[in-house]
Amino acid sequence: MGNRHDYWEGIYLSNKNKFPGWYQEYPTHSINLIESCHLEYEAQLLDVGGGDSLLVDHLLVKGYKNISILDISSNSLQRAQDRLGEKAKLVNWIAQDVTEFSSNKVYDLWHDRAAFHFLLTEEDILSYVNHVKNSLKKGGWFILGTFSDKGPKKCSGLPITQYSSEKLSVLFGKYFQLIDWFNDDHLTPGGGVQNYIYCRFRKQ
């Protein structure tokens, strides 16, 4: 984990004034998928890899009260806290590698856009699956946005793992039901196109 942690800390230190490739001013698909779960505003939400994402800003505006942000990079979390100012006190910030994640909380929703595809080894991928399973209550929602099999093979200088709906169904199907999915072309700040697959699962 150490090398992965150091890499991402370096990315956020060296690109203080640059938007990463996954940047979205308004994360339309993530917000629509979260709202489609019809959760109470007091529900426990976890955003994985969401350190410097603007999703938390919009969720706070919409009235969600129990938001946790997990990211391997404390620098990315600090950027988000600086941006939010006083509102940062309303959020639970967790600087941790998702493959080593542990929490006393049981969440109603786990959201991940653009973190999962950076896991390459079977050990890390299966660890992720188990953490999602153990962190969500029965009937809880798992929303995943990750690079599709039509997407890029590298991101931020790193190799990634591509996914299809079939591959994700097999990977998570022991514990989750795939409710719906779709592909989307994301336009990066640099003008590139990255194809994502978005899935909404429910814990059985």
Image (tube, rainbow, N blue to C red):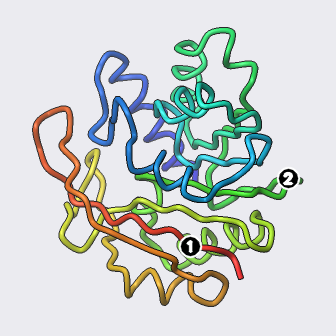
Q: CA distance from mark 2 to mark 1?
A: 20 Å
Circles 2 and 1: CB atoms closer than 8 Å: no
Figure quadrant of residue 13: top left
Image height of 85 relative to 153, above or below? above
Tell whether 169 sits left or right of 26.
right
Q: Quadrant of residue 99?
A: bottom right
Q: Earlier in the sequence, mark 2 or mark 1?
A: 2
> Up-down: is 118 above or below 76?
below
Location of residue 79 in the rendering, given as x and y in whole percent from the top left corner: 52, 20
Residue that protrudes farthest toward the left in the picture: 191
Badge 2 marks a residue whose secondary structure is loop
Q: Which residue is mark 2?
A: 105
- Quick one: SS at disc 1? strand
Residue type for callout 1: Phe
Q: Residue furthest right?
A: 104
- How many C-alpha atoms fall within 10 Å of the one at disc 2: few (<14), some, or many (≥20)? few
- Residue at 43% x, 41% y is 7
Residue 161: image location, x then y, percent:
34, 69
Q: Amino acid at mark 2?
A: Lys
Residue at point 75%, 23% (across, down): 90
**Quadrant containing the N terminus in the rendered view:** bottom right
Question: Which numbered mark, 2 or 1, is in the foreground of this view?
Answer: 1
Left or right, residue 33 beside residue 61: left
Please tell me which residue lies in front, 131 or 25. Answer: 25
Q: Is residue 125 above or below residue 32?
A: below
Residue 201 is marked as 1
Q: Residue at x 40, y 40 (%)?
A: 27
Q: Residues within 10 Å of mark 1 (few under 14, many from 20)?
A: many
Give the residue at x 25% y 59%. Answer: 184
- Of the 4 image quadrants, the one containing the C terminus is bottom right
